Image (cartoon, helix red, strand yellow):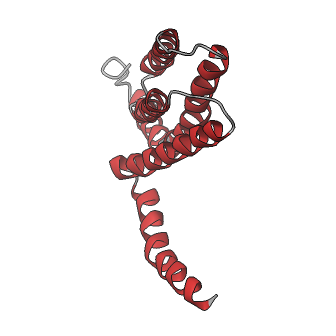
C-alpha cells in the first residue's frame, strides 16, 4: 500500500500546482490542456463502446472533437457548425464504405454523440475561461462610448 501511495503523492505535488498555474495563465497552454482532456475523454468513450460491441469511427470522432475545442478557443461559431456538418458527412460516407453494414445507424450515432458529448461540453471550459477577457473588453468599449468616441468604436 505504501509503495503505491508515494508515487501518486509525488505526481500530485508536482502536477497540481502546474495545472493551477496553466488554468490561471490561460492562453494556448490552457487550450492544449483542455484538448488533452478532450482527446483522452473521447478515446476512452469510444473504447468503452467498442467493448460493448459497437464500432465507432475513432479517428474521425477524435479529430472532430479536437476541432470543436479549437473552434471554441477562436470563438468561431460558423466553424463549429461546419465541423459538426462535416462530421455527419464523413461518418455517413465511411459507414457506406464499410464491408459489414450491420447496425450502421448505431455506429454513426455513437461516433457523432461521442464527439459532440465530450468535445462540445469540454470545449466550454475554454469558453468559461475567456469570460473575464470578454467582460473587460466590453467595459473598455462602454467607456469609449461614454467619451463620445462611438463613431470610432462601434
On screen, residue 45 versus residue 65, left or right, reads right
Q: Position of residue 1 (x, y in %)?
A: 64, 87
Q: Residue furthest front?
A: 99
Q: Residue furthest bottom?
A: 2
Q: Position of residue 87 (x, y in %)?
A: 48, 18
Q: Is residue 53 placed above or below 31 in the rendered structure?
A: above
The mark total stands at 0
Q: Between 59 and 126, which is closer to the camera in this rendering?
A: 59
User: Which quarter of the figure has residue 152?
Assistant: top left
Q: Position of residue 53 (x, y in %)?
A: 66, 33
Residue in the picture at 57% in, 26% down: 111
Q: Is residue 111 placed above or below 128 in the rendered structure?
A: above
Q: Is residue 17 placed above or below 85 in the rendered structure?
A: below
Residue in the picture at 36% in, 48% down: 27
Q: Between 112 and 59, which is closer to the camera in this rendering?
A: 59
Residue in the picture at 55% in, 30% down: 115
Quarter of the picture holding the C terminus: top left
On screen, residue 9 versus residue 110, left or right, reads left
Residue in the picture at 59% in, 19% down: 108
User: Which quarter of the figure has residue 70?
Assistant: top left
Q: Position of residue 56 (x, y in %)?
A: 56, 28
Amino acid at each position: 500500500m505504501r509503495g503505491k501511495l508515494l508515487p501518486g503523492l509525488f505526481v500530485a505535488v508536482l502536477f497540481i500546482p502546474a495545472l493551477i498555474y496553466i488554468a490561471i495563465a490561460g492562453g494556448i497552454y490552457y487550450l492544449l490542456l483542455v484538448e488533452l482532456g478532450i482527446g483522452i475523454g473521447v478515446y476512452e468513450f469510444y473504447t468503452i463502446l467498442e467493448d460493448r460491441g459497437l464500432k465507432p469511427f475513432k479517428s474521425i470522432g477524435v479529430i472532430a472533437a479536437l476541432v470543436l475545442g479549437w473552434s471554441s478557443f477562436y470563438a468561431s461559431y460558423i466553424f463549429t457548425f461546419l465541423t459538426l456538418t462535416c462530421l455527419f458527412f464523413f461518418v455517413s460516407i465511411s459507414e457506406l464504405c464499410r464491408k459489414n453494414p450491420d447496425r450502421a445507424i448505431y455506429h454513426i450515432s455513437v461516433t457523432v454523440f461521442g464527439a459532440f458529448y465530450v468535445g462540445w461540453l469540454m470545449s466550454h471550459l475554454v469558453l468559461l475561461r475567456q469570460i473575464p477577457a470578454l467582460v473587460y473588453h466590453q467595459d473598455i468599449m462602454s467607456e469609449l462610448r461614454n467619451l463620445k468616441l462611438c463613431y470610432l468604436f462601434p
